[in-house]
Amino acid sequence: MDFVELTTDPIDITGVARRVIPPECGATVTLDGYVRKFTKGRETLHLFYEAYEPMALKEMQKLIDQAKGEFEIANIGIVHRLGKLEIGETSVVISVAAPHRKAAFAACEWLIRELKRTVPIWKKEVYADGEEWVEGEAVVPTAG
Amino acid sequence: MRVRVLFFGATAALVERRDIETTIDSSDSPADILKRFTAMYPELGSLRLLIAVNEEYVTEDSELRDGDEVAIFTAVSGG
């Protein structure tokens, strides 16, 4: 089963990984993305994530559809956390189940790269001496 | 015609609103809406902005219809 979710609750990483498994598969690759303490030498106290929720869910589903067209994989689960996150807390989990691991690794890498480019979610870094919304990479998603 | 303009993250912080209903001309494009808000909030002009209409990315010159939801936001930074 494929799924996309946004949640303000802590993400159960193992739960996400188990939900994507079909019997014909032999490997699941799971990315656990979490909050880093230092970014470009500056210390983060915590992060805050916000999404354009209905569009974010649609864009996540589009990534799943594209990935399934490009890679020999079975199921994908993507869960992104929103709201306030402390250092070390998981912000995003992507699990890809495939008959063989190679395609699962490749698809998982592709999915996180595209998610960071196209899914309308933003993070605010809160530092000891201020806060700022992080602007993503310059690449503009293609319309349509 | 009326459209609903949504802001998120950095753009919401600048405009100090998340949601504005506004009247536009039927020939107006997202670029015209951007111009109007940039005139009111010049700092918007220094951001790399993306536009979505009804939850789909569009280019600045795309057509708008009455009742559209136009979202204005910076390059995304999830993950």
Image (tube, coloured by chain):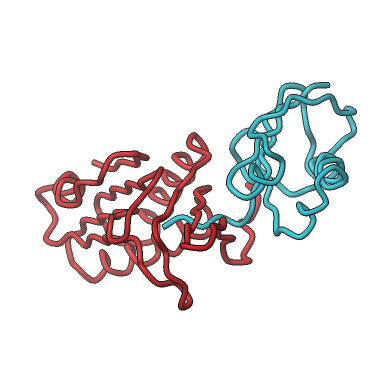
Left or right relative to A72: residue B35? right
On the image, the x and y values in percent for residue B53 come to 67, 37
Left or right relative to A26: residue A88? right
Which sits in the foreground, A142 or B34?
B34
On the image, the x and y values in percent for residue A107 come to 33, 63
Q: Residue at x 32, y 60 (%)?
A: A87
Q: Residue at x 72, y 28 (%)?
A: B20
Give the quarter of the figure containing the N terminus of chain B.
Answer: top right
On the image, the x and y values in percent for residue A126 come to 47, 57
Displayed quadrant of residue A108: bottom left
Shown colour of chain B: cyan
Q: Residue at x 56, y 58 (%)?
A: A132
Which sits in the foreground, A122 or A53?
A122
Which sits in the foreground, B42 or A54?
B42
Chain in red colour: A
**Whether residue A127 is situated above or below residue B39 in the rendered picture:** below
Left or right relative to A18: residue A110? right
Q: Residue at x 20, y 51 (%)?
A: A13
